[in-house]
Each structure stands twice: as C-alpha cells, then as structure tokens.
C-alpha cells in the first residue's frame, strides 16, 4: 500500500483564495464565498477587509447557521470544472454542491472507466470488431450526492448507477448531467438507502466493475433508515466486495468524518489486493491555497486538508 497526498490547484473555475482561523475563502467561477472550515487552524494571510469582499459568508449565530449575503449573490450559477459543468448552490449545510478536492480522484476514475468491461475468458487485446460486442464498464456510485464521480465515469464511457438517499441531491445531479451534455448517457438515478440497495442488487445478481462510495459519518435513508459510519461502513464494504464483477477494475472510498485515518479505509480494501492483486493508494485530499505574496495566481504551498480517501486499482 502507498500513502500519497492528492492536491487540487487553482484554476479559472475554482480557487482557494485564503484560509485560517477556522474559515476558508473560495472563488467558484466569479463568485467569492467564505465558509467555516475546522481544519484551517492557522492565521489568515489576507486582511479582514479582503474577506469582506465575499458575496456571501456562512456564519453561526446563537446556535443557528445562515448565509449572510450581498445583493450580488445569485441563487445558483454554473461553472466548468474538471471538464464538466456544475450548478453551484449555497445550501443550509454550508455546502455548494461541488467538492473541488476530488479532482485527482476524478482523473483516476476517468482513466479506469475507459473501454469495455473485461469479459471472462476473452483477452482485452481482442480486435476492434470483437470489442464492439463487449458491455461497457459498469460503475456504481454510492452516497453519490450531486454526481461528480457519476458524470466523470459516464463521460469516460461507463454505464453508471447513481444512488443517494436524498431526492433533492439526485435531482441536482441530473441537472449537472444535463448541463454537462451527459443527459443521454446510460445513468440510472436511484433514490434509495445505500445498504438496502446494495443487498437488493446482490440478490438480483447484478455486478459492477467499479464501485465508488462517499459515506457520511451520520445520516438517514429515504424511509428514515439510520446510517452510522462506525456501525455500518464495514458491513457495507463487505457487501460491496460481493457485488463486484469477476474481474473488477477499481474501488474508491472517500471520507469526511473527523477523527478517522485513511488507513482505516485502506485496510477495508486489502481483500481486493489479496484476491486480485493490483495496488492500493490512500491518504489526504487537499486544496492548495493561492500565493498572495507573489500575486502570481499560483499555489502558496499551504495545503488545506479536506478529506481522506483509499482506492484500489487492478
């Protein structure tokens, strides 16, 4: 197993302008937002008057949270990111609908989603005519939210099943697919509790070449099913290992639950390494802050930790 750090850098579509004192200042397209971030335990580089230029700031007051907005803040706006198009919407949970730190994982997912699914007993070096009869790679995206991984895999040519317990999130993901020109791609949109869906798929005999999951620390399914990562992650991963095809290609676990190590995710993927070989990488998801001293628009070298991941590739 290899420990690495994945980093998203500044681009025209997105930038981490500054961070510190439990906050981050970000640009999504041309809109600047200030949000809390418990990982930013260091001084800010920019003065407060620069932060005051943000069109919205997510604040906690007397136990309540809300966006303090300026008149110039739109309710939603589109941006292009990672070759896809997303609708950005500041939510009551401080989210925007996009997790820029996932860009490196999306690039990895795009590479392994290209081409036909490996068929048992048939060499992948078959002629182009033979390849036409192959099924596309089958990808399953669990806790799929607004669909970043779904769109990446679909764009690369995979057939994707997108599962999330939130009807609102699935509808948002479908809008992102349409905005990205992927509405006609083979994507099944499922509003369902993840554990319930996975167990049902196993009984149906459906199998997947790639599985991606982004489990929350706590949540509820559409029928009020309870999810606790400390109780349900290991059973879910075990079920998903059964759900893999005869020749699986990849398995990715992302995490945002505080207090967990990426090694914990990696250890859950060790059965794949023992059975199929391949490689496991795990580590931190980070975003590089802009360099203001040089005004160059390049990274400052200061990395904001945003999450953890572990991924297996055949």
Image (cartoon, grey):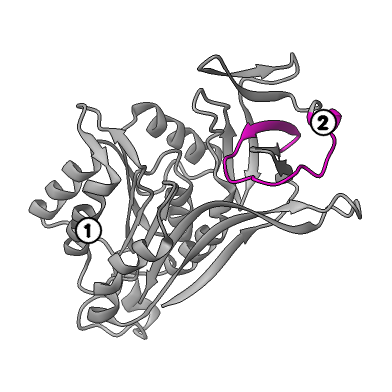
Q: Is residue 47 magenta?
A: yes
Q: Secondary structure at mark 2?
A: helix
Image: 56 above or below 246: above
Q: Are marks 1 and 2 in contact (CB under 8 Å)?
A: no
Task: Determine which of the numbered discs, if any, sits on residue 296 in the image.
Answer: none
Q: Which is nearer the eye, 34 or 116?
A: 34
- Residue 91 located left or right of residue 129: right
Q: Which residues are magenta?
A: 27-51
Q: Residues within 10 Å of mark 2 (few under 14, many from 20)?
A: few
Q: Position of residue 162 (x, y in %)?
A: 34, 45
The residue at 28%/71% (across/down) is: 248
- Residue 58 located left or right of residue 247: right
Task: Determine which of the numbered discs, if any, sits on residue 48 in the image.
Answer: 2
Give me the C-alpha separation between circle 1 and circle 2.
Answer: 47 Å
Q: Is residue 33 magenta?
A: yes
Residue reaching furthest to the right:
294
The residue at 25%/81% (across/down) is: 274
Image: 127 above or below 150: below
Q: Residues within 10 Å of mark 1 (few under 14, many from 20)?
A: many
The residue at 24%/58% (across/down) is: 237
- Residue 171 located left or right of residue 44: left
Q: Which is nearer the eye, 285 or 165?
A: 285
């Amino acid at each position: 197993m290899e420990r690495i750090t994945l980093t998203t850098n500044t681009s025209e579509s997105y930038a981490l302008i500054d961070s510190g004192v439990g906050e981050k200042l970000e640009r999504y397209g041309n809109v600047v937002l200030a949000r809390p971030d418990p990982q930013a335990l260091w001084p800010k580089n920019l003065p407060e008057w620069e932060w005051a230029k943000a069109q919205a700031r997510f604040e906690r007051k007397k136990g309540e949270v809300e966006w303090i907005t300026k008149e110039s803040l739109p309710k939603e706006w589109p941006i292009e990111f990672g070759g896809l198009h997303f609708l950005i919407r500041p939510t009551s949970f401080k989210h925007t609908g996009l997790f820029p730190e996932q860009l490196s994982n999306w690039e990895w997912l795009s590479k392994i989603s290209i081409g036909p699914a490996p068929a048992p007993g048939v060499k992948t070096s078959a002629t182009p005519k033979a390849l036409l009869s192959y099924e596309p790679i089958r990808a399953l995206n669990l806790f799929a939210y607004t669909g970043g991984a779904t769109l990446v895999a679909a764009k690369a040519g995979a057939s994707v099943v997108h599962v999330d317990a939130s009807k609102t999130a699935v509808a948002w993901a479908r809008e992102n697919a349409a905005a990205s020109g992927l509405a006609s791609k083979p994507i099944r949109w499922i509003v369902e509790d993840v554990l319930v869906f996975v167990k049902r798929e196993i009984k149906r005999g459906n199998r997947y070449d790639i599985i991606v999951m982004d489990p929350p620390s706590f949540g509820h399914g559409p029928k009020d099913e309870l999810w606790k990562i400390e109780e349900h992650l290991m059973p879910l991963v075990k079920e998903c290992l059964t759900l893999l095809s005869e020749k699986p290609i990849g398995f990715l676990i992302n995490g945002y639950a505080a207090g967990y190590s990426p090694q914990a995710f990696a250890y859950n993927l060790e059965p794949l390494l023992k059975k199929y070989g391949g490689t496991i990488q795990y580590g931190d998801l980070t975003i590089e802050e802009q360099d203001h001293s040089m005004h160059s628009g390049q990274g400052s070298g200061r990395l904001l930790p945003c999450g953890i991941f572990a991924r297996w590739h055949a």
